[in-house]
Image (cartoon, rainbow, N blue to C red):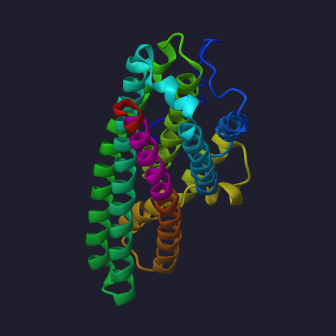
Amino acid sequence: MATSPSSFQPSFHARSNSLPSRQHPITSQIDENLNRLRASQSASTSSSSVGHQLNCLQDLYDSVDILLQLPLAQQSLAQEQQRKLVEQLLDGSLMLLDACGTAKDALSQTKECTQELQLILRRRRGAEGLANEVRKYLTSRKAVRKAICKALKNLKHMENKLSKDGETGAVTSTLKQVEAVTISVLESLLSFISGPEAESKSSPWSLVSKLMHQKKVTCEEEHKANEIANAEATLHSFIKSGSMKHAENVQNELENSEMCIEDLDEGLESFFRRLIKARVTVLNILNC
């Protein structure tokens, strides 16, 4: 993969005199969501696991939305001594939105190329016509990886900066922890979309073998781990063989990849809207 999603869990020190919402039950809900997401980072990086993380992230931001509506939380964020920290959070949210945009573009581009390949297969234009479209797909995937690599570097920079932050108030501390776990989930998502580049150039069975070694799960389970990478590996094998005898297998892998992309795109879009809402809310608090 382009990088490995981290299990980054920063240690923030909250001031005891800045606990405007500590007694509110939403703080316990946020803590529960954070712990659930941190635990999910140790799970396999299958499409179902990444999708689950996106769903958990949506739940987390729903809880954050409730927190940001509390008068005491708004008062805490509006304090002059908190302004620099809040502005840093706003800057971070922009970078998170950029990373989401990269993921959305990557999914859209890969889906479009996948659908074009499926159309060629249905029209039965032969090996040469399919090979040309496959090459376009593989070229597109290289561009996707390049964009993802840049996004992952930006997320890593955010991650390193968060780990160096010092003492904060309770509300800003909570929001920083939310930011940290969001970075981790987006790393998982982007890495999944990118896929294991080196293995994707080998045969599907070589890919499965390598993934088995990494995750120590059964071959049958790991073959389903990354539908996008499996489709790409199958297409690399087709280019090498130039034979249409495995066209049905290619079609199946492309269909699996498209369904995976649609599921991830739906979860990402839902989270994207919540991230924008949280940013707008914090901006409004500062401007009041």
Q: Position of residue 153 (x, y in %)?
A: 37, 31
Q: Position of residue 155 (x, y in %)?
A: 41, 32
Residue 92: quadrant of the picture:
top left
Q: Position of residue 273 (x, y in %)?
A: 44, 53
Residue 42 among those drawn in magenta: no
Q: Is residue 4 visible?
A: no
Which quadrant of the figure contains the C terminus? top left
- First to last magenta residue range: 268-283
Residue at 64% x, 38% y is 41
Residue at 32% x, 84% y is 126
Left or right: residue 7 compared with residue 128: right
Residue at 40% x, 16% y is 80
Q: Is residue 270 above or below residue 33?
A: below
Q: Is residue 199 above or below residue 72?
A: below
Dominant secondary structure of the magenta stretch? helix
Residue at 35% x, 49% y is 101
Farthest residue, direction bottom: 123
Q: Is residue 138 above or below residue 71?
A: below
Counting labels gives 0
The one of 243 and 179 positioned closer to us in this rendering: 179
The one of 194 and 124 positioned closer to us in this rendering: 194
Q: Is residue 58 visible?
A: yes
Q: Is residue 197 above or below residue 32?
A: below
Q: Position of residue 137 (x, y in %)?
A: 32, 63
Left or right: residue 140 compared with residue 71: left
Left or right: residue 11 compared with residue 77: right
